[in-house]
Image: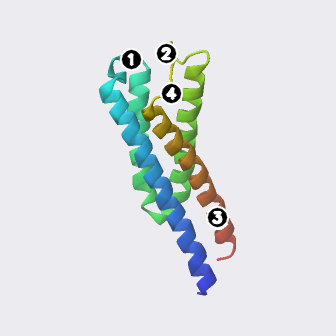
């Protein structure tokens, strides 16, 4: 195995790890917001919990090399879905809920979700490219 191969694998594994950290941040924000505010909001509250649970499952899956591609894909979908839901909630509203303002928790969620989408998508692309060269 050459240094280039080892370096590529290290970059891919690091990207999956960073993606997991970003999903953990996203889950933490959703749990904090659920406990603080959204627990009483029909549909939105349970969606916040579901986001956190799925994010934790994805993080666990990212710890196992065999499951990394599929769980990373699910992680991209969860983070992109959360971003999409937020965007819709600022417009027409989502399940009767309309978001106003842009507080710190929303900023943290957007940063972690967008970061997770970018990093996990890059990890998937790099993993696919590296797999061709194995």
Q: CA distance from mark 1 to mark 3?
A: 40 Å
Label 2 close to label 1 by CB (< 8 Å):
yes
Indicate whether 32 appears above or below 21: above
Numbered-mark total: 4
Residue 69 found in image quarter: bottom right
Q: CA distance from mark 2 to mark 1?
A: 8 Å
SS category of the residue bearing label 2: loop
Q: CA distance from mark 2 to mark 4?
A: 15 Å
Label 4 close to label 1 by CB (< 8 Å):
no
Identify the mark nearer the N-term, 2 or 4.
2
Label 3 close to label 4 by CB (< 8 Å):
no
Identify the mark nearer the N-term, 3 or 2.
2
Q: Residue at x 55, y 48 (%)?
A: 115
Q: Residue at x 41, y 33 (%)?
A: 50
Q: Residue at x 57, y 54 (%)?
A: 120
On the rendered structure, is 1 left or right of 47?
Answer: right
SS category of the residue bearing label 3: helix
Give the number of the mark in front: 3 or 4: 4
Q: Give coordinates of residue 55: x percent, y percent.
A: 43, 44
Q: CA distance from mark 4 to mark 1?
A: 18 Å
Identify the mark nearer the N-term, 3 or 4.
4
Identify the mark nearer the N-term, 4 or 1.
1
Indicate whether 89 appears above or below 124: above
Q: Nearer the viewer, residue 131 or 6?
A: 6
Q: Give coordinates of residue 27: x percent, y percent.
A: 40, 41
Indicate whether 23 appears above or below 122: above
Give the number of the mark in front: 2 or 4: 4
SS category of the residue bearing label 4: loop
| Residue holding disc 2 | 97
| Residue holding disc 1 | 41
């Amino acid at each position: 195995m050459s240094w280039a191969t080892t370096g590529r694998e290290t970059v891919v594994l690091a990207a999956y790890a960073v993606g997991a950290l970003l999903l953990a941040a996203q889950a933490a924000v959703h749990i904090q917001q659920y406990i603080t505010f959204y627990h009483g909001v029909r549909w939105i509250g349970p969606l916040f919990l579901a986001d956190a649970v799925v994010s934790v499952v994805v993080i666990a899956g990212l710890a196992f090399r065999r499951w990394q591609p599929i769980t990373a894909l699910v992680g991209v979908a969860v983070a992109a879905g959360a971003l999409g839901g937020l965007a819709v909630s600022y417009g027409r509203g989502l399940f009767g809920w309309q978001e106003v303002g842009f507080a710190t928790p929303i900023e943290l969620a957007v940063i972690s979700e967008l970061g997770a989408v970018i990093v996990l998508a890059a990890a998937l692309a790099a993993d696919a490219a590296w797999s061709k060269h194995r």
